[in-house]
Image (tube, grey):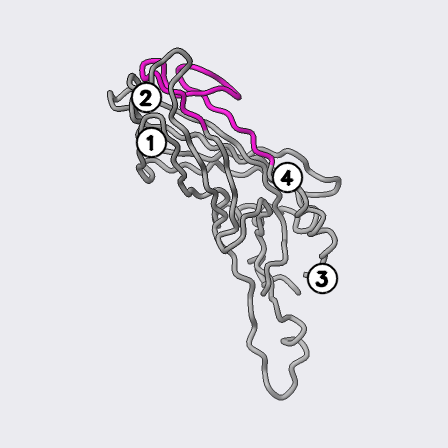
């Protein structure tokens, strides 16, 4: 395969499979008026322990994966290049927003009764990106924070869990990675950290934080 002109591939299947073996590193944490990294957040006024229980990235298609494909490849490059009398229509790889499913719980703080805690409504979120590992010789650019406020509103009832889908590495972040010279085949590792805010039933502010690792580069997602 080869890249579509403009950055929008020699097949490195072995490297890609190795990169794909990196399991999702989930760093579940939360913070608010109480708690800190690895503890529950929320707010002392609410009596709630608000926590991100899990984050599962998805490529926007049917696959749950932490491998983020940023480069759109020409899947039938050989056929196009070797067409004779009848031209072959180019077939490009599909590139999607990389999203994630987050499961968030709202349980009582230690010593608090279930009937005393509040429902929580979350409606703003941000994703910040940090570099975990930049292989020797690779280019690993810093990526801008994804800020969505107001975003989709959802309510977590007292003493329940709720699963939502949110953008994780959207097309804009992939385009920025390419524009800043991000490496295609070295597969650097980043962490995306969600900060989600909202209010309880009494309009007290609440916040929950959680992170997941991802690997970015030129992965082969041609059919």
Where does label 1 land, which residue? 156
Nearer to us in this view, 165 or 167: 165
Nearer to us in this view, 97 or 64: 64
- Residue 24: x and y in percent read 60, 39
State which region is magenta.
Answer: 25-51
Spatial separation of the CA atoms under disc 3 and disc 4: 22 Å
Q: Height in image: 35 above or below 148?
A: above
Inspect the magenta stretch and tell me whether residue 141 lies in it.
Answer: no
Classify residue 51 by image quadrant: top left
Spatial separation of the CA atoms under disc 2 and disc 4: 33 Å
Q: Secondary structure at mark 4?
A: strand
> Which of the marked residues, 2 or 3, is nearer the chain's N terminus?
3
Classify residue 88 by image quadrant: bottom right
Q: Secondary structure at mark 1?
A: strand
Where does label 4 land, which residue? 189
> Which of the marked residues, 3 or 4, is nearer the chain's N terminus?
3
Q: Secondary structure at mark 3?
A: loop
> Which of the marked residues, 1 or 3, is nearer the chain's N terminus?
3
Residue found 42% across the figure and 26% down from its top: 208
Where does label 2 land, which residue? 205
- Please state if 58 lies on the left or on the right of 148 as rendered: right
Mark 1 is surrounded, within 10 Å at the Cα level, by few (under 14), some (14 to 19) or many (20 or more) other residues, namely many
| Residue at the far left in the pictured view | 202
Mark 3 is surrounded, within 10 Å at the Cα level, by few (under 14), some (14 to 19) or many (20 or more) other residues, namely few
Q: Secondary structure at mark 2?
A: strand
Give the prevailing secondary structure in the magenta stretch.
loop
Camera-near label (2 vs 3) is 2
Q: Which mark is residue 112?
A: none
Nearer to us in this view, 32 or 62: 62
Q: Which mark is residue 10?
A: 3
Tell me the quarter of the image containing the N terminus. bottom right
| Circles 1 and 3 in contact, beta carbons < 8 Å | no
């Amino acid at each position: 395969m080869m890249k579509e002109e403009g950055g929008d591939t020699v097949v490195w299947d072995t490297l890609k499979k190795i990169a794909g073996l990196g399991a999702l590193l989930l760093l579940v944490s939360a913070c608010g008026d109480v708690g800190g990294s690895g503890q529950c957040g929320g707010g002392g006024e609410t009596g709630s322990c608000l926590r991100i229980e899990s984050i599962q990235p998805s490529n926007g298609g049917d696959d749950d994966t932490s491998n983020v494909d940023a480069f759109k490849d020409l899947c039938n490059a050989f056929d196009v290049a070797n067409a004779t009398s009848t031209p072959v229509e180019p077939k490009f790889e599909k590139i999607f927003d990389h999203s994630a499913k987050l499961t968030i719980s709202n349980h009582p703080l230690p010593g608090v009764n279930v009937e005393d805690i509040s429902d929580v409504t979350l409606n703003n979120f941000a994703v910040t990106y940090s570099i975990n590992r930049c292989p020797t010789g690779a280019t690993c650019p810093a990526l801008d924070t994804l800020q969505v406020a107001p975003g989709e509103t959802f309510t977590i009832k007292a003493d329940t869990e709720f699963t939502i889908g949110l953008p994780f590495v959207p097309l804009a972040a992939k385009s920025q990675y390419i524009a800043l010279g991000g490496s295609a085949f070295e597969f650097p590792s980043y962490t995306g950290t969600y900060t989600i805010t909202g209010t309880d039933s009494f309009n007290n502010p609440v916040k929950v934080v959680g992170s997941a690792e991802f690997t970015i580069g030129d992965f082969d997602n041609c059919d």
